[in-house]
Amino acid sequence: MSPAPDRTTVAIVGGGPAGLLLSHLLRKRGVDSVVLESRPRERVESRQRAGILEHGTVDALREVGADARMDERGLPHDGFAFHAHGERIGVDMAALTGKAVMIWAQTEVVKDLIALRLEQGEPLLFEAEVLSVSEVDGAVGDGAGLVRYRHGGAEHELRADVVVGTDGFHGVARRAVPDEAVRTYERVYPFSWLGILADAPPSSDELVYARHDRGFALLSMRSPSVTRAYIQVPNGTDPSSWSDDAIWDELEARTALADGSFTLNRGTITDKSVTPMRSFVAEPMRHGRLFLAGDAAHIVPPTGAKGLNLAVADVRVLAEALATWHDTGAQELLDAYSDTALRRVWRGEHFSWTMTTMLHRDPDADPFDDRLALSHLRLIAQSESYRRSIAENYRGLELDL
Ligand code: PHB
């Protein structure tokens, strides 16, 4: 890799999927960028996150040439199922909407995007801790933003026409926006997910989202021999306080069907972790020469598997806007970026909130909330148009919302 330049067109703070994909989309359009990632490469490549790719996300990975392993090993999925208090409700996405999703873990997406960037010899620095983002007040094309970072024991400065913050919810980029210039919206849920990876073949061809009196459970997969599964647990749960047998017993109880037709495959658990659940949006997603994308601007609870897909949608819109400005000087698309992205973000927020509240048992809820959730699931079971609406949201809407 060539040494990192101290001047670039787009400084990308954060080398997760959003930042990496943005760098590739920009390169394809002839716009140079530098990606700074604070964590070591191994950490970025081992982070376990949701693994459902909407078809628009699949298209974006194809566009940048990060599709070979996805096509070989990803698992196309036509539908998923709800298990609601022992009853199965199938949602046949492909039949209802003509589109499917792909199960391909974020971890794998990130590995491919990193390998490609390094192969191209384009600047991507790991263990580059961004200390500050400044001088972003003011118009694009009229001055430069400044990113100060520590790398290899020394402090460096990077100047860029535009700075993009893709450094996640806890990142430094959003903090460069003055408090009075941003409005935030937030919901913290009174439960978390205990997630496992296990050497066990998936118990069903389709993902299973279960609501039960004991709480939510999700059966997903990573390959024909690896199960990914989650159960709702109280906030603050220590993953090591759950024995492997207790996790399997809980998954079994919550996903069981009343007619006995569902069997859970058990196996060796190789990883356990707890994820808190949060909804969060910061508006607008731009301040002067600083643009925010992905988790740096918005968070969803993982129930609808929207986090990665929203991040990819953001950077697709942003890449187009930046390339247009770079080629022609026109800034209309840059000016529209925040509003355009936020329309999709809020659709994702609503869908994720709906799935979350419908499928979890809120320990503080009264029986009224439980009745509403059950009625919601019955409606999905009975109404094809309602199932279609869920399926459209799940596989990703094409509408200009
Ligand atoms: C996953 O496979 O990790 C996964 C799948 C679907 C979700 C969330 C996570 O809604």
Image: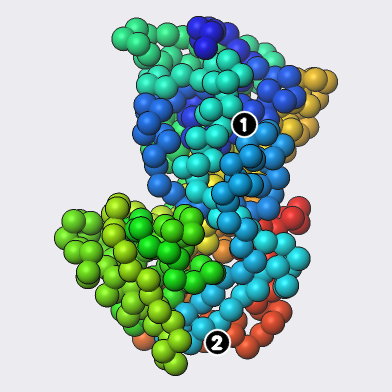
Q: Residue at x 67, y 69 (%)?
A: 93
Image coords of residue 356 (percent x, y):
46, 67
Q: Amino acid at mark 2?
A: Arg
From this viewpoint, which residue is outermost toward the bottom?
Answer: 259
Residue 200 at what x, y percent from top left? Answer: 38, 62
Q: Is mark 2 within 8 Å of ligand 1?
A: no
Residue at image point 33% right, 73% down = 251
Judged from this view, the residue extending furthest toward the left is 241
Residue beneath disc 1 = 22
Q: CA distance from mark 1 to mark 2?
A: 41 Å
Q: Is mark 1 within 8 Å of ligand 1?
A: no
* Residue 227 seen in the current view: yes
Instruction: Tally the numbered discs.
Output: 2
As drawn, 106 above or below 323: below
Q: Quadrant of residue 18?
A: top right
Q: Secondary structure at mark 2?
A: helix
In the rendered image, the vertical position of residue 342 relative to residue 182, given as above or below: below
On screen, residue 231 above or below 177: below
For the point 41% across and 28% down, the residue is 41
The amino acid type of the residue labelled 1 equals Leu
Q: Residues within 10 Å of mark 1 (few under 14, many from 20)?
A: many
Instruction: First in sequence, mark 1 or 2: give its number.
Output: 1
Percent position of residue 364, x then y? 30, 74
In the picture of the structure, the residue carrying the numbered disc 2 is: 378
Q: Relative to 2, is 277 on the left or the right?
A: left
Residue 164, by quadrant, is: top right
Residue 301 x %, y %: 45, 57
SS assignment at label 1: helix
Residue 276 seen: no
Q: Nearer the viewer, residue 316 or 86?
A: 86
The reply, left or right, for residue 48 in relation to residue 109 is left
